[in-house]
Image (cartoon, rainbow, N blue to C red):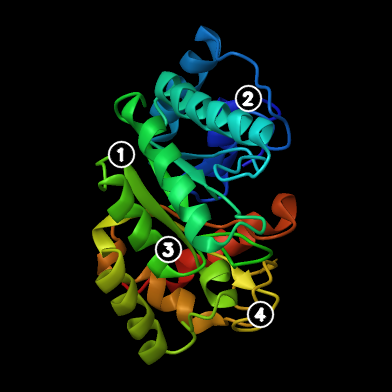
Amino acid sequence: MPTGKGLGAAVRVGKSIGCTAVQVFTSSPKMWSSKPITEEAIAELAAALAESQMGPVVSHDSYLINLCAPAPETKAKSIEALARELHRCGQLGIPYVVSHMGAHMGQGEEEGLRQVAAETKAILADAPPGVTLLMETTAGQGSSLNWKFEHLSELFSATGAPSNLGVCLDTCHIFAAGYDIRTQESYEATFEQFNHLVGIGRLKVIHCNDSKKPLGSRVDRHDHLGEGEIGETAFRLLVSDPRFDGVPILVETPDAETMHAVNVGKLWSWVEA
């Protein structure tokens, strides 16, 4: 939800279109700097949450963050920015921070994963209580990490799997990365593989997006639900999957102002009674 009028307004607008969970940016995702969290902002969000009976609020960190950036200055800024976002969410009472984590930019996947694991472990050791960092699955575009479930498994292993580390799964991203979820059989096979390598219990948030690009394209382009290459079946299965009861399922589809209400409405209509 857009936050130009404040986090409280984002929650209220989300409620008005049928949301029971929302995702926000606590600062601009395209800038390194961020304004300090004020007592007024904390109070405003708390009031909106109480008034709306909204479920979890999820934060997405800056798009600039790359914990394995080859440029030392960028890497240092990334570490500082992610640590700061976790603390901002601690102040606001936001339980989850979603991050793309890193792109190896020619260093190779193993070296990228090694660096991401080391920096993640250090950042989480000093993170505020009540805030969990969620590694987002990616489409594998460019040199992005975490397009394979094996990457997530390796990062949990290398960090010692702290309790404040989890996963955000994006349906568009995993599909573009090569994981088919278009039929009941392929959906079940994909999540069985995820459970085997990562663990369903570590999946805390789902980004629910159709894909403009085909299976295995490694290109990240979101589409409206049921209108892209994934199709309606996968989303019907997702919203009625008892394994995800209580897991926020968030749309990040295009044309937010006019279409978010439509896509959220589709999801509610596809829930099996």
User: Do we see residue 143 in this rendering?
Assistant: yes
Q: What's the distance in space between the residues labelled 4 and 2, CA to CA?
A: 37 Å
Badge 4 vs badge 2, beta-carbon distance below 8 Å = no
Q: CA distance from mark 3 to mark 2?
A: 36 Å
* Disc 1: CA contacts within 10 A as few (<14), some (14-19) or many (>=20): some
**Quadrant of residue 239 in the image?**
bottom left
**Type of the residue with mark 2:** Gly
Q: Is residue 158 above or below residue 45?
A: below
Quickly name the residue at label 4.
217
**Mark 4 falls on what kind of element?**
loop
Query: Label 1: which residue?
Result: 164
Q: Residue at x 35, y 23 (%)?
A: 128
Q: Nearer the viewer, mark 4 or mark 2?
A: 4
| Residue 235 falls left or right of residue 25 | left
Q: Label 3 is placed on what type of residue?
A: His
Identity of the amino acid at label 4? Ser
Tell me which numbered mark, 4 or 3, is placed earlier along the sequence. 3
Q: Which mark is residue 151?
A: 3
Residue position for label 2: 6
- Observer-nearest residue: 64 or 160? 160
Q: How many marks?
A: 4
Query: In the rendered structure, which disc, 2 or 1, sits on the residue that comes first in sequence?
Result: 2
- Residue 252 location (% of width, % of height): 61, 56
